[in-house]
Amino acid sequence: MPAPYPLLDMPPGDFKNMFDYPAINMAAAHNAFIQGINSMVSHAPKVEGNKVQPFIIFSLAVVDSVHHHHDLEETFYFPELEKKLGKGALAASVEQHHGFVPQLIELKGYLEAVKEGKEKYDGPLLVEKINSFSDIMIHHLSDEIPNLESGKLRAVFTEKELKDLDSGFMKLALAKIDFNTTLPLSVVCGNPATPWFPPFPTPLKWATRYWFSRKYRAAWEFGPLDLYGTPRVASG
């Protein structure tokens, strides 16, 4: 069983420096995905009874977040970066997406079928489906970070251009998510070593903890952190 995967090392630099920020923020986002995958593999064999549906909600949120992230990269973020970095600069990353996204979509189909009662929950099968792509995906998540190295960006972008690019990315990201799943997931799959991630304004952090988490509260118990960002005590 490949999981648990280690979290990625954070790139050097200052999170508040706009040239350092893209790589640091990307690594933090990728670590949240790794946390989610690790949690799915850890809990899948043990889930039963009335815990199945909350676990399916959690798992769908993980899969949707990964897929949403890579879709935005391909349709917006990478094309914008390539306007300055050069056409094809991110082509290798897009090619790597093709190595695991089909299996990710297949996994989503299985999870949705279980949610709708069309398939019986099978923990070992779920782990098998994750293992069919997780090694390739984790390798990709690591490979992608050097593309955003501070020196590369500083050579061709201004600070304002990077701020505008990040603002555009976040605007699109927030427009296409379910706040009741993506926001709580990003907190419970966070990393205590990077407490500033996700980079939500304080009012949104409070809304996530006390409002957006309520609809599927039982699902967030499967995250490695609680809704305050505190690591859960492992049981058994």
Image: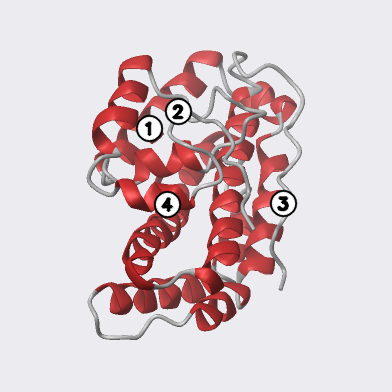
- Residue at image position (36%, 45%) is 182
| Type of amino acid at the residue the image marks with label 4 | Ser
Answer with mark 2 or mark 3, whichever residue precedes in sequence: 3
**Residue mark closest to the camera, 2 vs 4:** 4
Mark 4 vs mark 3, CA separation in Å: 19 Å
Using the image as rendered, state which of residue 233 and residue 180 is in the foreground. Answer: 233
- Residue under numbered circle 1: 170
Tell me the kind of residue under disc 1: Met
Q: Is residue 116 left or right of residue 66?
A: left
Find residue 180 and report its image quarter. Answer: top left
The residue wearing badge 2 is 166
The label on residue 65 is 4
| Circle number at residue 60 | none
Q: Nearer the observer, disc 4 or disc 3?
A: 4
| Circle 4 crowding by C-alpha within 10 Å: few under 14, some 14–19, many from 20 | many
Label 1: few (<14), some or many (≥20) within 10 Å?
few
How packed is label 3: few (under 14 Cα within 10 Å), some, or many (20 or more)? few
Q: Secondary structure at mark 2?
A: helix
In percent of the image, x 58 and y 23: which residue is there? 157
